[in-house]
Amino acid sequence: MRPVGDPADDTRPSGRESGGESGGEGGGFAGDGFGEAVEAYRHELQVHCYRILGSFTDAEDMVQETLLRAWRRRETFEGRSTPRAWLYRIATNACLDLLAGPARSREVTAGVGGEPRSPFTEVPWLQPYPDRLLDLAGAGQGRPDAVAVERETIELAYLAAIQHLPPRQRAVLILRDVAGWPAEETAAALELSVPAVKSALQRARATLRLHLPARRSQWRPVTAPTEEERAVLRRYMDASVAGDLSALAALLREDARQTMPPASLLYAGRTAILEMWRPVMAGPEAWGEWKALATTANRRPAVANYVRRPGESAYTAVNLDVLRVEDGLIAEITTFGPELNAVFGLPAEL
């Protein structure tokens, strides 16, 4: 866990994190109440932090930071808000503190060369989020306030686009438009006036529209890949394992794109993607024999790729491809390294 902010301040009650939403009575958490309360919201808080930060590993760290701050302030919880709202306030401000730190400054960078810009090349810290953990966040554990995590609020393109917003605008947008908080509660959590929250939300929505894919308005509130997407994924896996570039070409839109965070690389168009794949998959410089395992990330179909290089006995994890499918063809491939395979439940070797 990476500490955030001034540790000395963690023992003092914070006005922006101590309540505001009506409901509940009494102060502090009795007995095992604290552990039960925070554990019920752990996965949900991680998704919330991930939306703000765009990084799975940073979100994990900020959940730990949130629980530490909450434990130190547990006696200041007065019951004027629900435990969920109280924890969300702490988590939001922990993320804002991280983003404000000099070592964590994150300026969105420009795209590569003269190629059309892509949100993924501009956000090198972007990481995928496994659907199996999204399902835990939406499972609710018997809570009536739990809601399923839908694609439109966890889609990689959405996560990359909101990174263009200043941190406080980003927090306002997520609390208002995703978490559904009223303006008054958002203002209290962020120590802003209600007019300031409304103004920030208006500016955030306008900026977001500039960076979201053109067809974003057609996204449906789904919580799993569609049958069409799963079929495209199966064909993509079969063609990749076989090294069949013709079959792969037939799966790609002409204007398809591939990016590889954290590298600022953008391959724009079917031809550019195939030329990049060719030496890796075919010919004398080919990496070796391939295998693939299907998974899902950010409510999109995904595949973990493994290669057995000449002279080796095991297939080693190489990368994780997350696919965006439009009209039965692949429109976008976001390729990540294998560093998060474990949290996807994927092996390092086959």
Image (cartoon, grey):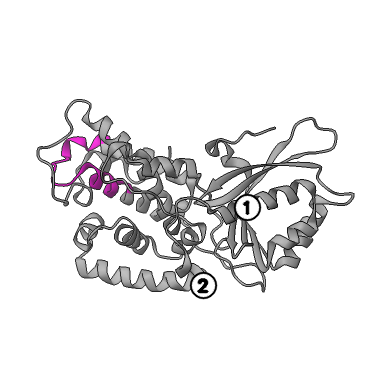
Report how many numbered discs are placed on residues in the image. Answer: 2
Q: Is residue 78 magenta?
A: yes
Density class for disc 1 (Cα within 10 Å; few <14, some 14-19, many ≥20) is: some
Density class for disc 2 (Cα within 10 Å; few <14, some 14-19, many ≥20) is: few
Residue kind at label 1, given as amino acid type: Ala
- Pick whichever, 178 or 249, lies toward us: 249
Res 183 → quadrant: bottom left
Can residue 3 be seen in this snapshot? no
Can residue 249 be seen in this snapshot? yes
Disc 1 or disc 2, which is closer to the eye? 1
Under circle 1, the secondary element is helix
Q: Which mark is residue 231?
A: 1
Mark-to-mark CA distance, 1 and 2? 24 Å
Q: Residue at x 56, y 53 (%)?
A: 227
Furthest toward the top, the residue is 31
Q: Is residue 44 above or below residue 264?
A: above
Res 260 → quadrant: bottom right
Under circle 2, the secondary element is helix
| Residue underneath mark 2 | 214
Which quadrant is the C terminus positioned in? top right
Residue kind at label 2, given as amino acid type: Ala
Q: Residue at x 44, y 59 (%)?
A: 152
Q: Which mark is residue 101?
A: none
Furthest toward the right, the residue is 284
| Main secondary structure along the magenta-highlighted residues | helix
Query: What span is in magenta?
Result: 71-91
Task: Give the percent coordinates (x, y) of residue 70.
Answer: 27, 38
Task: Give the percent coordinates (x, y) of residue 151.
Answer: 45, 55
Which quadrant is the N terminus positioned in? top left
